[in-house]
Amino acid sequence: MSSNSPSNESTWTGYLHGRRVILGVSGSIAAYKAALLARALVARGADVTTVLTEAATRFIAPLTFEALTQNKAYTDADLWTGPGVLHVELARNADLVLIAPATQDLLARVAAGRANDLLSLVVAEFSGPVGLCPAMHTAMWESRATQDAVHRLQSFGYQVLAPDSGPLASGDEGSGRLPEMQVILDFAEGLLAPKDLAGLRVMVTAGPTREPIDPVRMLTNPSSGKMGFALAREAYLRGGSVNLILGPVHDQPPAFIEVKHVQTALDMADAVNRDIHETDVLLMCAAVVDFAPVNSTDTKIEKDGFDDVLRLKRNPDILSGVTAMEKRPFVVGFAAQTDLLLEKARKKMQKKHPDLLFANLVGRGRVFGRDVAAGLLLRPDGSHTEVTVRPKRAVARLILDEVKKGLK
């Protein structure tokens, strides 16, 4: 992208957008959730064609999927009814095969190389990415036969998403539940995303820090962690090994990612310094509180004496500490300003020397807690890109695209 040019991507188009997905459904009680998954895939822009096993049709009708996807849903009854060879045509025209739920029987048959129904025929014919989302009772999931099948499927290059733990249809509790929809969608996107960050160790800091004054008061800020989550998710989808250092936030971090929870700026500095020498890329997205009380008390400070007690000291500047290292990772800094964005961002760039800096305006309802962001992406040569308002996941993709260029 040329110097000082605006970037005009206004909507988020993830890795499922425009892709042709075969959604395989096998005979589990979780088959009803496949309908919700089909709708979610379509909402992400995927062109979804459903293939149901005979057992699956006893739990949910093909017509449900046809209504949700606007495509014909296929069963074994369609195998020899149309022109051409159906399983060959379906496999040839797909970008991804995603089976959710995948029963023990389905896993065992595919692992054994059997192709005795339409869905297993499609898998056998398909040469692209295959994702399987098992759902079954805990004892079935943990059985030697199922685990052997999973290992064999993984040896084929297929990806298997481990089930969640929780209440099961039998009334028991344990592993075997179909994972939450967002987890499956991230799993599917990861199967289609480019792996251009593979082999890179990426550290992301996110969220605010909290500096305790007494047991009932603290210094903090409204950072939601959403921008850091978007960066961590994007780096993971593109093959990076992600270490997320997270301050106190309300939302759950993305699945599949190693998370270290911290509270204070000193906690965050310690967590960063502990792993920085094994890090290739640092995305310093956290809103670290600049000051902390000189003394934090174990008892509540009475209002009458509060003004006399509260004295502040500077917290360590984590970003400057990393950029001053002789052997340092590629560093992306973030700057939140309320005015004079370009002028103040350039000053921070010159003072702290990151390899990239994303600066954005905050205050008056902007940015904090929202799912969209806008700002300026600055480079060491003085050029910058204006990033117009877009989902934070789209901003994350743009930033990591720039990181990839910088690493070259």
Image (tube, rainbow, N blue to C red):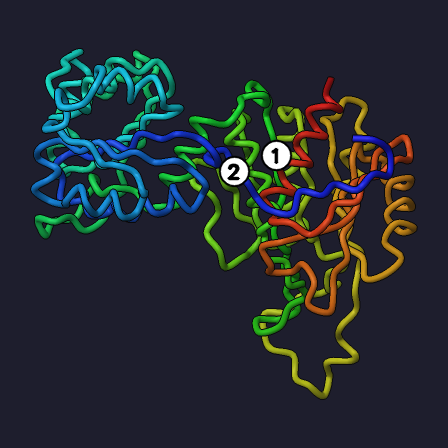
Q: Name the one closer to the observer, 337 or 275.
A: 337
In the picture, the quarter occupied by the C terminus is top right
Mark 2 closeness class: few <14, some 14–19, many ≥20 residues within 10 Å: some
Report the amino acid beneath label 2.
Gly
Q: Name the one closer to the observer, 80 or 358.
A: 80
Vertical order, 335 against 328 (above or below): below
Mark 1 closeness class: few <14, some 14–19, many ≥20 residues within 10 Å: many
Report the amino acid beneath label 1.
Met
Pointer 1 residue: 203
Q: Residue furthest front?
A: 83
Q: Residue at x 91, y 35 (%)?
A: 382
Judge whether residue 145 can be spotted in this image. no
Q: Residue at x 20, y 37 (%)?
A: 135
Mark closest to the chain's N terminus, 1 or 2? 2
Q: Name the one closer to the observer, 244 or 344.
A: 344
Mark 1: which secondary structure? strand
